[in-house]
Image (cartoon, rainbow, N blue to C red):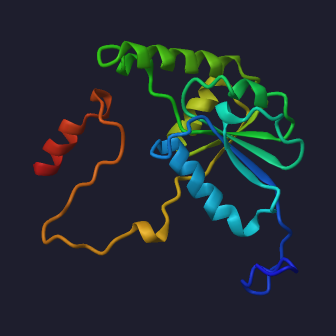
């Protein structure tokens, strides 16, 4: 994009926007962190230099007072409470695994899921949300949130590869935990 704000696409012009992205986890291998980075990179041509990307727990400074504030949420997050008070906050919902799926596997993770569900029920219903799937959007609507939009996950073009194997290949991306039913997936694939 040049200084005049031209995107170079069909002569369209736009002005730069300011978006502050806040993620709950510093680990760059965390799925929510990776997804937030993909969104930030996809928006990069449209972002003003004042835009930022930060981790909620590492941000000691006050929340930005201008621009949109994207707060990614997928588990109990103490930092999520701060963004309530910002009139320009938008939460991005990556879903919360139901605690019942986690009790036998990891009681501590299940307790965190309970805390996340409770936190969701305590958040104001008029907060705007972006869900990463229709399923997640439905979960938010069941809780009673009024403004819920769906924006699907982003996959960068470079992530797609040409087929390299003669036989079909199965790639599982996600946490290896019993509720993901990886063994059932492998059995179905084998069948």
Q: Is residue 52 left or right of residue 101?
A: right
Give the camera-side residue of 80 and 130: 80
- At 85% across and 50% down in the image, what residue appears? 67
Residue 174 screen position, x and y as percent: 36, 42
What residue lies at 56% left-to-right and 39% top-to-bottom? 26
Q: Residue at x 52, y 53 (%)?
A: 153
Visible in this render: residue 59? yes
Give percent across and percent down for residue 10: 74, 86
Q: Quadrant of residue 116?
A: top right
Which residue does the image show at 62% across and 62% down from the upper left? 41
Quarter of the image that includes the N terminus = bottom right
- 174 sits to left or right of 53: left
Q: Find the residue positioned furthest to the left.
A: 191
Q: Position of residue 144 (x, y in %)?
A: 68, 25
Q: Is residue 151 above or below residue 165?
A: above
The location of residue 107, given as percent across then percent down, is: 38, 13
Residue 84, image quadrant: top right
């Amino acid at each position: 994009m040049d200084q005049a704000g031209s995107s170079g696409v069909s002569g369209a012009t736009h002005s730069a926007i300011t978006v502050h992205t806040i993620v709950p986890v510093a680990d760059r291998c965390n799925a929510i962190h990776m997804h937030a980075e993909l969104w930030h990179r996809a928006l990069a041509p449209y972002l003003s230099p004042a835009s930022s990307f930060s981790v909620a727990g590492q941000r000691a400074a006050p929340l930005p007072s201008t621009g949109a504030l994207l707060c990614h949420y997928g588990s109990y997050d103490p930092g999520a409470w701060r963004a309530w008070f910002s009139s320009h906050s938008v939460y991005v919902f990556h879903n919360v695994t139901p605690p019942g799926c986690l009790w036998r596997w990891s009681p501590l993770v299940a307790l965190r899921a309970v805390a996340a569900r409770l936190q969701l029920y305590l958040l104001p219903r008029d907060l705007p949300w972006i869900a990463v799937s229709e399923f997640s959007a439905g979960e938010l609507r069941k809780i009673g949130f009024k403004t819920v939009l769906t924006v699907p996950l982003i996959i960068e073009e470079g992530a797609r590869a040409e087929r390299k194997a003669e036989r079909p290949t199965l790639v599982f991306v996600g946490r290896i935990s019993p509720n993901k039913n990886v063994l059932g997936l492998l059995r179905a694939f084998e069948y």
